[in-house]
Image (cartoon, grey):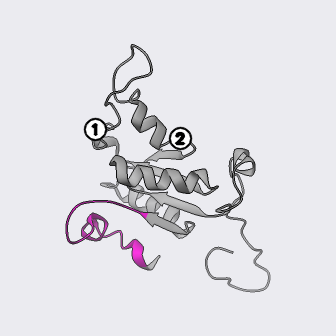
Amino acid sequence: MVGQSSGPAEEAVDRWAGCPPDLEARSDALRRIRVCDLSGQLAGAGSTRLLAAFGAQVIRVEDPATRGGWDIVRGAQPFHDDRRGIEFGATFNNHNTEKLGITLNLRTERGRELLTQLIAVSDVVTENFAGAQPVSDRRGDRHAGA
């Protein structure tokens, strides 16, 4: 059940309602674990790729302002065919297979609200931003206590 119950009349909320059916075909090891993935690059994307391979539902959150440019492997070689661009880097596609993805503009109040809701129903939050203080803390997301 998500959140606090206000009384006996309130029914439990199934936080997995609407979950993609392909999760049932994956490994059972991390089934019913939801990961809010704010990471990128090789280390972050690679680690959450392993979680997805073992059955976790990984939801990759991207920023529309960067147009995919923050993750350097998104458009990097090797390529599968003659197409080029941020959608065709084989390394990016390999590291992000089996994941769901959303684009949230965290510069807006609505984007921050949606991220807060996603974090509330997630078991794990990942990020791999540089710096001594996490970028999420500087932005005010405060996911650590969620």
Which quadrant would residue 133 be assigned to in this image?
A: bottom left
Within 10 Å of disc 1 (Cα), the crowding (few <14, some 14-19, many 20+) is few
Which quadrant would residue 128 be assigned to in this image?
A: bottom left
Residue for point 23% across, 61% down: 130
Label 1 residue SS: loop
Separation (CA) of disc 1 from disc 2: 18 Å
Residue for point 53% across, 60% down: 35
User: Which of the two discs, 1 and 2, sits closer to the camera?
Assistant: 2
CB-based contact (under 8 Å), mark 1 and mark 2 = no
Amino acid at the residue labelled 1:
Gly
Above or below: residue 114 compared with residue 144: above
Percent from the top left, x then y, of residue 53? 59, 50
Instruction: Judge left or right: residue 99 versus residue 75.
Output: right
Within 10 Å of disc 2 (Cα), the crowding (few <14, some 14-19, many 20+) is some
Residue 59 visible in image = no
Amino acid at the residue labelled 2:
Thr
Label 2 residue SS: loop
Numbered range of the magenta stretch: 126-144
Which quadrant would residue 126 be assigned to in this image?
A: bottom left
Q: Looking at the picture, tell me which residue is in the foreground, 125 or 55.
A: 55
Percent from the top left, x then y, of residue 145? 43, 80
Q: Which numbered tag is attached to residue 97?
A: 2
Instruction: Judge left or right: residue 49 versus residue 40.
Output: right
Q: Looking at the picture, tell me which residue is in the foreground, 38 or 102.
A: 38
Taking the view exactly as shown, the residue that stands out farthest to the left is 131
Instruction: Judge left or right: residue 42 versus residue 138.
Output: right
Q: Which numbered tag is attached to residue 69?
A: 1
Taking the view exactly as shown, the residue that stands out farthest to the top is 82
Residue for point 43% across, 16% down: 81
